[in-house]
Image (cartoon, rainbow, N blue to C red):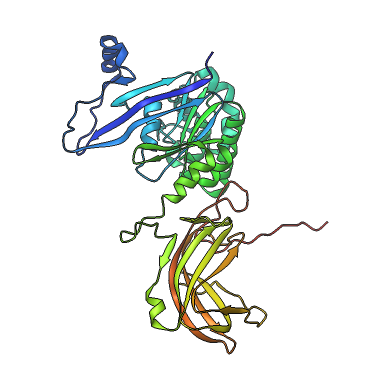
Amino acid sequence: MSDVAIRIAGLGKRYRLGRRERYRSLRDSLARAVRAPLRLMSRARPECGETAGTFWALKDVAFEVRHGEVVGIIGRNGAGKSTLLKILSRITEPTTGQVELYGRVGSLLEVGTGFHPELTGRENIFLNGAVLGMTRAEIARKFDEIVAFAEVEEFLDTPVKHYSTGMYMRLAFAVAAHLEPEILVVDEVLAVGDAAFQKKCLGKMGEVARGGRTVLFVSHNMGAVANLCSAGVYLERGQVKIRGDVQSAIDAYNASWAAADPATGRPAHMLYDRPDNAGATDFGITRVEVLSHDRRPKPVVCTGEAVVLRFHFHCRRPLQSGAVAFEVSPRNGPQLWHLATEPDGAFPLAFRPGDQIVDCEIDPLPLAAGEFVLGAGLAIPSLQWLWYEPELAPLTVLPADYYGSGWAPAVPRSLVVVNHTWVTPS
């Protein structure tokens, strides 16, 4: 028996802009299945010359997922992630290509689908469970577990129209999370609820993954993806760019945030040229690079990782004793750091005429996700600035699981992250 749970080949989905897909009843679908059984999950490729007003949400997608594999599907908004899961869940049909599914499929795509506001929580558990494909016996067997997970025991016989949004979402997720399919597809369900509920949901998803079931997990929370998944698929504009280990997919996703500079073609957040600074005075920073700990170009940086800020200087004349300093501030905010090569009052750097390089190694980077500004300068022992630029270059920091909790630090609750330990005195 093959260990492949999902096989996708040449998959594409085309939408006609300005039109809605025609709704088909169950009777229509059954009739079409009888007339053309081989076309259920396969579509012929369109003829050459696409008509105007069409959009390909997916194009030529192909990969396999093995039984028991937990795969993170990641990409920016509009990359085609949700469309892919809807095709796998048989909610929408592909335009081209083929999908083979080996096992019962359960979907957590839109939490709460199938709830009726006039029915009680108890009644909606049975209704929603049936919508999601559970038998009545399955629902009855798991009923107490679902109620306990949702924490709505006191309101179980109250119509859900009187529930708060949090209660509604807890109950909806509790029902969906207790499915027992061989293949589970999950789309951003962890984006709802408060932090405590999100953590509880993540724990439940971890149980599902450790149970040996095949999971496809879509999320913009890279901490959750890294903790939950062993493999990753990175989608960009409807096409698969990376299919491999989860960290490679996350790195590709993070790099996508570094938009190219139209003038240089280089990622705007990796390299900053300031040749004008060399001609203004005898000293000036002409370039800033953001590098990884092993001195490789780093298009973007993440909270908690090791980074190197490389400053390129140009000197018209020699300098026997100087110091380099740089500052970090949030955009339109107060200064957070002032780091210099002379914390003890010494000015150890000597510069000869020409180009110079000074690296500042930061490990780990203690900035929470956000947009920051780098300022930098060159000083002499009298603390006189020979050159200073308060807004030299932008620095974008992406979220990461700094504390190992499965979640990135809350934004904008804090601008910095701090290593710390909680202790309860005995």
Q: Where is residue 259 in the image (x, y as percent from the top left)?
A: 37, 55
Q: In this view, does 84 lie to the left or right of 246?
A: left
The furthest residue to the right: 426
Q: Which of 195 and 233 is in front in this view?
A: 233
Viewport quadrant of the C terminus: bottom right
Q: Quick one: which residue is furthest to the front in this view?
A: 353
Q: Nearer the viewer, residue 391 or 144?
A: 391
Would you place residue 123 above or below residue 305 in this image? above
The N terminus, quarter of image? top right
**Where in the figure is residue 306, as x and y percent of width and height?**
59, 57
Foreground: 108 or 293? 293
The residue shown at (37%, 28%) is 87
Please provide percent x and percent y for residue 300: 47, 56
Numbered label tally: 0
Q: In this view, does 86 lie above or below 338?
A: above
Residue 254 vs residue 22, the one in the foreground? 254
Q: Which residue lies furthest to the top in this view?
A: 34
Whether residue 104 is visible, yes or no, is yes
Q: In this view, does 363 lie to the left or right of 8?
A: right
In this rendering, would 269 be left or right of 363? left
Residue 225 visible to an observer of this rendering: no
- The correct choice, above or below, for 374 with respect to 63 in the image is below
Q: In which quarter of the image is residue 197?
A: top right
- Who's the residue at 18% across and 38% down the image? 53
Return the x and y of residue 49 as percentages of the image width and height.
17, 31
